[in-house]
Each structure stands twice: as structure tokens, then as C-alpha cells.
Image (cartoon, grey):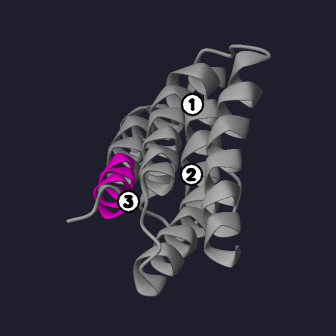
Amino acid sequence: MTPELTALTLAAILQYLQFALYAVPANRELGPGFTMSARDRPPNNTLTDRTARLGRAFDNHFEGLILFAIAVGVIQMSGQNSALTALCGWVYLIARLLYVPAYALGWRPWRSLIWFAGFIATLLMLLVALF
């Protein structure tokens, strides 16, 4: 497996881990009556700030993962794998790993800078594929 595909696979596994990090406290805080319902109404309870941040980090990773998967797919299908695209894959993954605690713990401005590193790594992979 190429480094880019390995990074993508690990990023997908990270999404599963983020789900657990968010779902466990959310179920405790909102109660199973709400979390197993159709959620037609707002919950009676509220999430703690940290749990809400974990939920937003989880959603944010879905958004970034889509772009990263496209970048890896384009690099793989065009056969343009290189040391640079491998590095970009690892930068994305490391940034996403750091983003979870940065967001959960409210690290400002580090959270945004960490996010930006992963975003730029993904963009760079796409630009390499074009040029």
C-alpha cells in the first residue's frame, strides 16, 4: 500500500475513534432516550462544552476527509505518487490527530493552525496532480 493510501486508511480509522470519543459522553449527557430517538425535538439536556467540541471536530473531519480522499484518489489513479505527496498524506493525518485534542481543549489559535496544516497538505496534493 502506498503511503498516501496508508494515511487515508488511518484517517478513516481516526473517524471511527472520533465517533466513540463523541458518542460515549454525548449518550451519558443526553441520555439514551434522546440518542436512540428520531430526534424530532431538541434534547432536554445540553452537552458540555468539551463534548460539543468533540462533536464539531467529528463533523469537521468528515468534511476534510472527503477532500483528502479525493486528493489521494487523484494521486493514486494518475500514478503521481511522490515523496511530496507521501509527506502531504502524513501531514494531513498528523494534523487531524492533533486537531481532536486541540478542538476539545479549546486551544486557540493552535486549533485553527493545525486545521490549516491539514487543509494545505490536501490542497498541495491536488496541485501536484494538476502540474
Marks counted in the figure total 3
The quadrant the N terminus occupies is bottom left
Q: Residue furthest right?
A: 109
Name the foreground residue: 2 vs 53. 2
Res 61 label: 2
Res 99 label: 1
- Rendered residue at 68%/16% (across/down): 106
Mark sitting earlier along the chain (2/3): 3
Does residue 16 appear to the left or right of 83 in the view shown? left
| Residue 41 falls inside the magenta stretch | no
Question: Few, some or many C-alpha atoms within 10 Å of disc 3 (few <14, some 14-19, many ≥20)?
Answer: many
Name the quadrant containing residue 46.
top right
In whole angstroms, how far apart are the C-alphas of marks 2 and 1?
9 Å
The residue type indicated by label 1 comes to Tyr
Does residue 120 appear to the left or right of 81 in the view shown? right
Q: Position of residue 33 (x, y in %)?
A: 44, 53
Residue holding disc 3? 4
Q: Which residues are magenta?
A: 4-14
Secondary element at tag 2: helix
The answer to whether mark 2 and mark 1 are in CB contact below 8 A is yes
Question: Few, some or many C-alpha atoms within 10 Å of disc 2 (few <14, some 14-19, many ≥20)?
Answer: many
The residue type indicated by label 2 comes to His
- Mark yes or no: residue 25 visible: yes
Q: Position of residue 13 (x, y in %)?
A: 30, 53
The residue type indicated by label 3 comes to Glu
Q: Position of residue 6 (x, y in %)?
A: 28, 57
Mark sitting earlier along the chain (2/1): 2
Name the quadrant containing residue 42.
bottom right
